Amino acid sequence: MSYDAPFAGLKVVDLSQGIAGPYCGMMLAQHGANVIKVETTEGAGDWSRGLGVRYGNHSVFSIVGNMGKRSVALNLKTEAGRDVLWRLLDEADVFMEGFRPGVIKRLGFDYEAVSARVPRLLYVSISGFGQSGPLAERPATDPVLQAYTGMMVENRGEDGIPHRVPVIVVDMSTALYAFQAVSAALYARRDQPRGRFIEISLMQAAAALQSIRMMACHLEGGTMKPGAVPGGVFKTADGWISMAVINDRDWLAMCEAMELPQLGRDERFATPAARVADPEALYAIVRPALAARPTQHWAERFGAARLMYERLNSYAEFMAQPHVEATRLIHWLNQPGMTQPVPMPILPGAVMPADGTPGATAPVCGQHTEAVLREHGYSPDEISGLMAGGAIASAR
């Protein structure tokens, strides 16, 4: 155990699929845990491997969600496959599952059954709507929870149409909340004789992520009023720029930078409250002025004035930024089945593993089945028998 690998020595058995659970497991692996990814022998394994464009045995979802893990393919519909999982759970510290409520119990691995055999285990259950309530059994993904929790309605464009946030923000935040819950529980478990059940849902994460806006909308009786005006995304002569003016110093500096000193003296906009009260009148002046000059012009002027602004970059433009390169934010990693290295942002707070090492590589389905079973006492003949009987599968 060290600051570079604080979870070294911990054993995690990860049955989760998609991205919310797997990304949590990936973070545990990047902090040093031994994470055994259990996938099905049917189809491609974890269904995230088939999301979007598929690259051999991978998709971008399965790469990001499984770096640093080892993959074992089990058929949990067979008694022999379930017996293997029980052996994997011996001396495990964390068990993760992401099935719809009731499925894991039918397989025989609900919390009561597992904790009876491994009393100090932390059992993490990740679902869409939670383990109880009228919607518990509904299938749910990131877009469903963005719609259900109000996120899409609040994310309206100027066209008035609600929009989905495309970066699976609910899945990713669920993973982050799960990781912090597991980390806190691991700390507390030092003085506890038993483990605990940790329930995490996409609904919980989506609501927690929106707590400020949700509270403001409730108190203001509708959509949250802007925190500061002017602010948002503005058209320039050749692109777009984002800007936030949060106090009077910034307001006057912006007016000077835009060569509109008279605007800074306009009594209609003299205070933050006045600017928030009548944003459209202000934007009727600011928007045409910004649209008349190119982005670089405003970047130079706003930069010199120390305003909070930024041009809108594509991902390619962002990754090519000198600051991104100087801080080594993006690491380029080779992955099985990929014809070129892929960009992986450094995990905040963790040490990025070197390209080509196990920590920097996402496994293909079943890649480590035989090695992991040998570690758990299975003989070569037993492994061959399990393979022949369809209880396990190797890399494919």
Image (cartoon, rainbow, N blue to C red):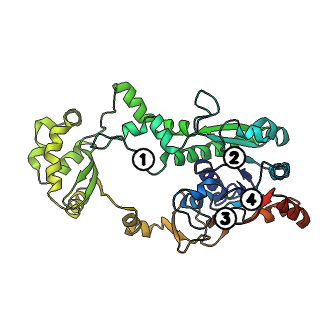
Mark sitting earlier along the chain (2/1)? 2
As measured in the structure, the alpha-carbon distance from the residue carrying label 4 to the one carrying label 1 is 33 Å
Indicate the amino acid at tag 3: Val
Label 4, secondary structure: give it.
strand
Give coordinates of residue 110: x percent, y percent: 76, 38
Image quadrant where residue 325 sits: bottom left
Residue type, label 4: Val
User: Which amino acid is tagged 2?
Assistant: Met
**Sequence order check, earlier mark of 4 and 3:** 4
Spot occupied by residue 111 in the image (x, y as percentages of width and height): 76, 37
Q: CA distance from mark 3 to mark 1?
A: 29 Å
Task: Identify the image quadrant of residue 266.
Answer: top left
Q: In the picture, which quadrant includes the C terminus?
A: bottom right
- Front residue (pair 42, 334): 42
Q: Residues within 10 Å of mark 4 (few under 14, many from 20)?
A: many
Q: Residue at x 62, y 48 (%)?
A: 21
Disc 3 + disc 1, Cβ < 8 Å: no
Q: Amino acid at mark 1?
A: Val
Q: Left or right? Give the position of 324 relative to 350.
A: left
Q: How far, Cα to Cα, is label 4 from label 3? A: 9 Å
- CA separation in Å, label 2 and label 4: 14 Å
For label 4, the residue is 72
- The residue pinned by badge 1 equals 165
Q: Nearer the viewer, mark 2 or mark 3?
A: 3
Q: Which mark is residue 364?
A: 3
CA neighbours of label 2 inside 10 A, class few (<14), some (14 to 19), many (20+) = many
Secondary structure beneath label 2: strand
Residue that carries the numbered disc 2 in the rendered image: 96
Chain-order first, disc 2 or disc 3: 2
**Nearest to N terminus: mark 3 or mark 1:** 1
Q: Categorize mark 1 by other alpha carbons within 10 Å: few (<14), some (14-19), many (20+).
A: some
Report whether 298 appears left or right of 179: left
